């Protein structure tokens, strides 16, 4: 697939009734030499478990090796909404309060953090809308690991 980021994963749970598959993505050895591993969540942990909604969950069994792929557009929009936009909110609120009340440093910091917290709360409440817009596809491979 062109313009996709792919990771190998292992199915840890399959729920055909709800159309959900949980997969475990293990940290690649390339993460050890990556300069961005401190800000990347995959560098923080040895493995990460993702829950995916799929129309054909019955074809996946526990222990099956699969490939996850996400388009670069979906990946970049995820990064924007998770990291860049909150940073812009934090800075905008901080500097706005700074220019309005330069003598109250505590108010500036608390307001910026509170605005960022409210943003993440709204993002959490709207997670189902974002789940439908961010496309992660799962592709089965033939081997099964125990």
Image (cartoon, rainbow, N blue to C red):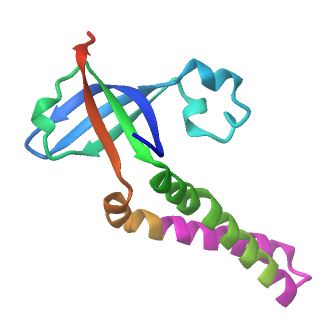
Q: Is residue 16 left or right of residue 81?
A: left
**131 up-or-down from 101: above or below:** above
Where residue 30 sits in the image (x, y, percent)? Answer: 61, 22
**Image quadrant where residue 102 sits:** bottom right
Dominant secondary-structure state across the stretch colored magenta: helix
Report the front residue among 121 and 126. 126
Residue furthest bottom as drawn: 100
Residue 83 visible in rendering = yes
**126 up-or-down from 103: above or below:** above
* Residue shown at 48% from the left, 56% from the top: 73
Q: Where does the N terminus fall, quadrant-wise?
A: top left
Q: Is residue 71 left or right of residue 19?
A: right
Where residue 58 sits in the image (x, y, percent)? Answer: 10, 34
Residue furthest front as drawn: 2
Where residue 34 sits in the image (x, y, percent)? Answer: 69, 29
Q: Is residue 122 left or right of residue 105?
A: left
Q: Where does the C terminus fall, quadrant-wise?
A: top left
* Residue shown at 54% from the left, 22% from the top: 28
* Residue shown at 72% from the left, 78% from the top: 93
Report the front residue among 137 and 43. 137
Residue 101 visible in rendering = no
**Magenta region, residue range:** 97-121
Q: Is residue 114 magenta?
A: yes
């Amino acid at each position: 697939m062109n313009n996709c980021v792919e990771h190998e994963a292992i199915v840890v749970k399959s729920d055909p009734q709800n159309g959900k598959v949980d997969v475990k993505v293990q940290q690649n050895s390339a993460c050890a030499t990556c300069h961005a591993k401190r800000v990347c969540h995959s560098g923080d942990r040895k493995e990460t478990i993702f829950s995916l909604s799929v129309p054909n969950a019955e074809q996946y069994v526990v222990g099956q090796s699969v490939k996850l792929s996400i388009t670069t557009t979906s990946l970049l929009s995820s990064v924007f909404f998770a990291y860049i936009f909150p940073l812009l909110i934090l800075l905008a609120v901080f500097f706005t309060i700074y220019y309005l009340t330069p003598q109250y440093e505590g108010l500036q910091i608390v307001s910026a953090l509170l605005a960022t917290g409210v943003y993440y709360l709204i993002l959490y409440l709207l997670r189902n809308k974002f789940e439908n817009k961010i496309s992660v596809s799962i592709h089965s491979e033939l081997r099964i690991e125990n």
